[in-house]
Image (tube, rainbow, N blue to C red):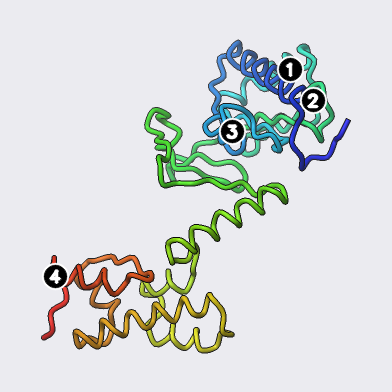
């Protein structure tokens, strides 16, 4: 048996994982413990209607106020149904049971852990994580991203390669960068146009620096036309948000024509 964590699970392993997961859910139902999914198992359920093949861990979340009084019963039922308990933490601020089923931990591991509520901050939290209560108080309000959104896994070398190609293809076709800190800083007003130009001049000549220089030149063209010295302050004053990319100049011109937000004084 291949026990490497970072690999696709076999059909047999996935089937065992599914049956064991359903058994765990049944045990939680018997104990009247409300549970919900997150991280990789939730992603697989929504996107693939299955488990993510290379994801070894199964995280099942519950509310600490319920689990703290029933953790002993849960441990007992899991053991009775053939699961091997690996560790139990009964402290309310880090409440969890870590266990495995038929296969070694490297193939599949299960964790049931609790989320505690903080009335002061109005969040549910566990160890280093916190979630606004509105997301867990009423699950019916959760909305799925529709078309135009993409979630890219990069847990294996192949999936990382696929994700890189996907991003590169979008950037080439749309003429804009995905995840450009300098561009974002300019849009939000964290740096000025002169500061961006200085940053670009310190960079080696490459596609990335050329992209930033096109942004600088786009701003400069519009500013010269309308007689302004700071495009961001203009946009901030008029409460406008502009997506800066290769068509930035045209977008500003359209705003000028439609909304008359750029007026030379």
Residue linked to disc 3? 44
**Mark 4 vs 2, N-terminal side:** 2
- Helix or strand or loop: what does disc 1 sit on? helix
The 10 Å Cα crowd at callout 3, few under 14, some 14 to 19, many 20 or more, is some
Q: Quadrant of the C terminus?
A: bottom left
Residue linked to disc 4? 257
- Helix or strand or loop: what does disc 3 sit on? helix
The vertical placement of 68 against 243, above or below, is above
- Give the left or right position of residue 96, taking residue 261 as reference: right
Q: Residue at x 69, y 34 (%)?
A: 53
Q: CA distance from mark 1 to mark 4?
A: 68 Å
The vertical placement of 79 against 90, above or below, is above
Q: Residue at x 23, y 77 (%)?
A: 234
Q: Residue at x 76, y 40 (%)?
A: 7
- Helix or strand or loop: what does disc 2 sit on? strand
Q: CA distance from mark 2 to mark 1?
A: 8 Å
Q: CA distance from mark 3 to mark 2?
A: 25 Å
The vertical placement of 82 against 230, above or below, is above
Residue linked to disc 2? 85
**Mark 3 vs 2, N-terminal side:** 3
Residue linked to disc 1? 78
Are circles 3 and 2 on residues that touch, CB within 8 Å?
Answer: no
């Amino acid at each position: 048996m291949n026990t490497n964590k970072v690999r696709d699970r076999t059909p047999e392993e996935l089937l065992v994982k599914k049956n064991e997961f359903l058994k765990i859910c049944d045990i939680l139902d018997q104990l009247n413990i409300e549970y919900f999914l997150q991280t990789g198992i939730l992603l697989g359920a929504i996107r693939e209607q299955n488990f993510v093949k290379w994801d070894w861990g199964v995280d099942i979340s519950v509310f600490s106020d319920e689990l703290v009084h029933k953790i002993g019963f849960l441990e007992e039922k899991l053991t009775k149904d053939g699961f091997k308990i690996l560790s139990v933490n009964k402290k309310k601020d880090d409440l969890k049971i870590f266990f495995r089923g038929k296969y070694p931990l490297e193939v599949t591991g299960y964790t049931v852990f609790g989320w505690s509520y903080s009335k002061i901050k109005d969040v549910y939290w566990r160890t280093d994580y916190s979630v606004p209560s509105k997301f867990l108080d009423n699950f019916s309000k959760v909305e799925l991203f529709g078309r135009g959104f993409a979630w890219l896994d990069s847990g294996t070398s192949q999936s990382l390669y696929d994700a890189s190609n996907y991003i590169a293809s979008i950037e080439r076709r749309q003429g804009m960068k995905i995840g450009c800190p300098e561009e974002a800083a300019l849009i939000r007003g964290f740096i000025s146009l002169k500061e961006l130009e200085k940053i670009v001049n310190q960079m080696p000549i490459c596609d990335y620096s050329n992209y930033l220089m096109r942004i600088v030149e786009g701003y400069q063209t519009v500013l010269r036309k309308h007689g302004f010295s700071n495009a961001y302050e203009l946009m901030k004053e008029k409460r406008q948000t502009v997506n800066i990319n290769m068509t930035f100049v045209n977008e500003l011109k359209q705003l000028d024509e439609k909304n008359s937000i750029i007026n030379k004084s």
